[in-house]
Image (cartoon, rainbow, N blue to C red):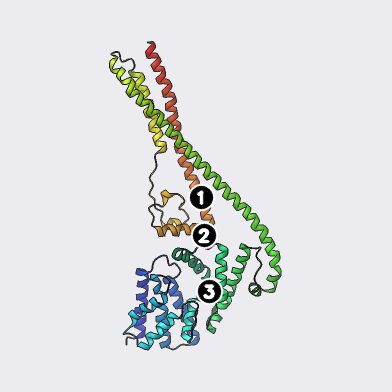
Amino acid sequence: MTDHQTLLQEAEAHVKAYFAENMPQKYVFHDLEHTVQTVAAMRTIAQGYELDQHDLHILEFATWFHDTGYAQGPEDHEERSCNNADRFLRGRLSEAELDTVKSCIRTTKVPQKPISLIEQIICDADLSHLGMESYWNRNSKFRQELILTRNLVLNDEEWVDFELNFMLGHEYHTAVAQELFNKRKAKHIQQLLKQKRRLNPKKAPTVQELALMDEKEKSGVLDKAMRDTENELKMERMGRGVETMYRTTYRTHTNLSAMADNKANLMLSVNAIVLSILVSSLLPKLQADPSLKLLIPTMLLSLTCLGSMVYATLATRPKVTEGKVTREAIKQRKANLLFFGNFYNMPLEDFQWGVNEMLRDSEFLYSSMSRDLYFLGIVLAQKYKYLMICYNIFMYGLIVSMAAFAISFIV
């Protein structure tokens, strides 16, 4: 058999390459970072039990491969992970060792039911983030992954309930993991409870939730709920005011844009009719009139119609944009995904990711709406500038042309 230490290095390199080549980017939680963190947590827990090198190596093999099956989807990924481990390790580990590796991988399936110590260790390591500082970051990524991979969109209150139910139903299996993670996990549960009360202050806490509160907090729940209710109502009224402002402003911009297009279309129609009359009626007379006294008025009227039509066309002519926003621009909160001209060339996954980022950050959403309104205003200003020139040309040109016709008939 191959030396375990060398084989572990090869397995680590293989798994990292496998994630880079096969794991879809939409799995933002079950990524290589999660696997690396799980391996580190497993080593820490195993160190507390002073496992021998053989069991430690078996655990490491299982931990490196335990989520590789996610490349083909979340359903039954444990079995695919076992197959990946089998293909790489067969012939390099004994049959008994390989069976132990696969048993450890299978036992990570939720709800976890580990039997042996090494199975308990890998299960605790897999969910170690529940009791670590990285919990909120990993929590956010897991929520994003559910949206991208399962189209499971939960509002904030539903998500907090989902997390609370999972956290309250979970227990670490090993005493070492309990010592390492339970204290911080309890703090996370407390913060989730506070979020739940803030999101829905009118909803009374459950008996289980009350049991998790300290006495001081219990006594202040009702007072705090009342204060939170008042603040929530103020924020709700403010939120409705902001939404009304944006809705009204968007409607105004849309109406003004429609009015500009209608005015431009009217000028195009009127000038096209005048030009058709000139061509059908005046041109034959110009050919029959040797003095050409109608030439100058006709040219003036023709130029007036052409000039008006040019600026009316400019007012309605669409502007082609690049249609692509980079992920870096979205991360820097400089992108606007509310206008189709900014995203029609983007890959669907990048667009969905950007929209999810915007929905999770209200400041980013409102700034995008404000930016969209600003550029709509720029476009409207350009439209009305061209329309003003169009109408000025038509008005003054028509006056000059009619005066020229009158003069030509008098003279």
Q: Earlier in the sequence, mark 1 or mark 2?
A: 2
Residue at point 33%, 83% (across, down): 90
Q: Relative to the observer, which residue lies in front, 94 or 181?
A: 94
Q: Which image quarter is the N terminus in?
A: bottom left
Amino acid on which disc 3 is placed: Leu
- Mark 1 to mark 2 CA distance (whole Å): 15 Å
Residue at point 37%, 53% (across, down): 345
Amino acid on which disc 2 is placed: Arg
- Mark 2 to mark 3 CA distance (whole Å): 21 Å
Residue at disc 1, secondary structure: helix
Horizontal and vertical percent position of residue 124: 50, 79
Q: Which mark is residue 333?
A: none
Quadrant in which residue 94 is drawn: bottom left
Disc 3 residue crowd, few under 14, some 14–19, many 20+, Cα 10 Å: many
Residue at disc 3, secondary structure: helix
How many callouts does the rendering have?
3
Q: Which image quarter is the C terminus in?
A: top left
Q: Which mark is residue 360?
A: 2
Q: Which residue is mark 1?
A: 369
Can residue 57 be seen by looking at this rendering? no
Disc 2 residue crowd, few under 14, some 14–19, many 20+, Cα 10 Å: some
Q: Relative to the observer, which residue lies in front, 233 or 371?
A: 233
For residue 46, above or below residue 144: below
Q: Which residue is mark 3?
A: 130
Q: Earlier in the sequence, mark 2 or mark 3?
A: 3
Callouts 2 and 3 close, C-beta under 8 Å: no
